[in-house]
Image (spheres, rainbow, N blue to C red):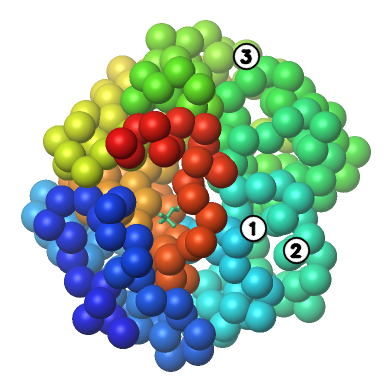
Amino acid sequence: MSSLNAPPTGTLHALHNQWPQATSVDDFRANLAAVRARIAAACQRVGRDPAGVRLLPVSKTKPEAILRLAHAAGCQMLGENKPQEAHRKWESMRDLPDLQWSVIGHLQTNKAKLVAQFASEFQALDSLRVAEALDRRLQAEGRGLDVFVQVNTSGEDSKYGLAPGDVAAFLRELPAFSSLRVKGLMTLAMLSAEAERVRTCFVQLRGLRDRLRHDVPAGVALDALSMGMSGDFEIAIEEGATVVRVGQAIFGARATPDSHYWPTAEAARA
Ligand SMILES: *Cc1c(COP(=O)(O)O)cnc(C)c1O
């Protein structure tokens, strides 16, 4: 199985069917090892320590039984795009106390209550209304949450995330929400088969982080860069990613098109 997860030549967005479904703990071990080897190779190309890159396996659309296999293979944090799907999975897997959840998709204020209950990390913060709603619910739960500010680096209109020029002012407001621990920035690259266009998005996020990190408000950290998915994580690592969010290369291809998760995906691919 791992031979089918061979390194990409450019990006793999056009090759979704190359990812076979993982259906056993051994499949997950092999896929995780293959992805980790690719992470290590990308780090080596640019002189980075692989310990500086966290692999976040993304389990969206996959059923609970499959998630349990991934956990048995060593996945202790899983990324989910949809708050309700994540909440449902958390509830049915509470017998695994060491399993943590990262919500990586857009959140509406009326779902903040769900996320505040169970998530360890939220990677798609892009409005003060959501920050306020999350903080209020987290205070009520007596919990804190690691957050990433999502930035729209592709310039695609309906993609979620703040415009790069709005991030500095946004960060200045966040210390008011004491249960949110700001860790860094997150982006989705443009879904393109052209590696260099994808790379531009990652370069932009790192540049923004480098410009802003020295005068962030007290309590806000801007060390982490969450960027890169199955089709482009090696490029992201070359450009400084500290978290890569990898679904299909670990779990197998998804039937649900990406346009279900971010509105312009199909248009951008064309
Ligand atoms: C689904 C998803 C990913 C992972 O995509 P793959 O192609 O499965 O690797 C990464 N980030 C976000 C925000 C996602 O929704």
Asked whether the beta carbons under mark 2 and mark 1 sit within 8 Å of each other, the answer is yes
Answer left or right for 164 relative to 101: left
The image quarter containing residue 193 is top left
Inspect this view and state whether residue 138 appears. Answer: no
Q: Secondary structure at mark 3?
A: helix
Q: Residue at x 60, y 54 (%)?
A: 80
The label number, if any, that marks residue 90 in the structure image: 2
Q: CA distance from mark 3 to mark 2?
A: 30 Å
- Residue indicated by mark 1: 101
Q: Residue at x 18, y 65 (%)?
A: 7
Q: Secondary structure at mark 2?
A: helix
Frontmost of labels 3 and 1 is: 1
Answer left or right for 8 relative to 75: left
The label number, if any, that marks residue 173 in the structure image: 3
Q: How many marks?
A: 3
Residue 2 spot, x, y in % from top left: 28, 81
Q: CA distance from mark 3 to mark 1?
A: 26 Å
Local packing at callout 1 (Cα closer than 10 Å; few below 14, some 14-19, many 20+) is many
Residue 212 vs 17, above or below: the answer is above
Asked whether the beta carbons under mark 3 and mark 2 sit within 8 Å of each other, the answer is no
Answer left or right for 130 relative to 238: right
Residue 67 vs 50, above or below: the answer is below
Mark 3 or mark 2: which comes first in sequence? 2
Please state which amino acid type lies under the numbered disc 2. Trp
Answer left or right for 62 relative to 242: right
Mark 3 or mark 1: which comes first in sequence? 1
Please state which amino acid type lies under the numbered disc 3. Glu
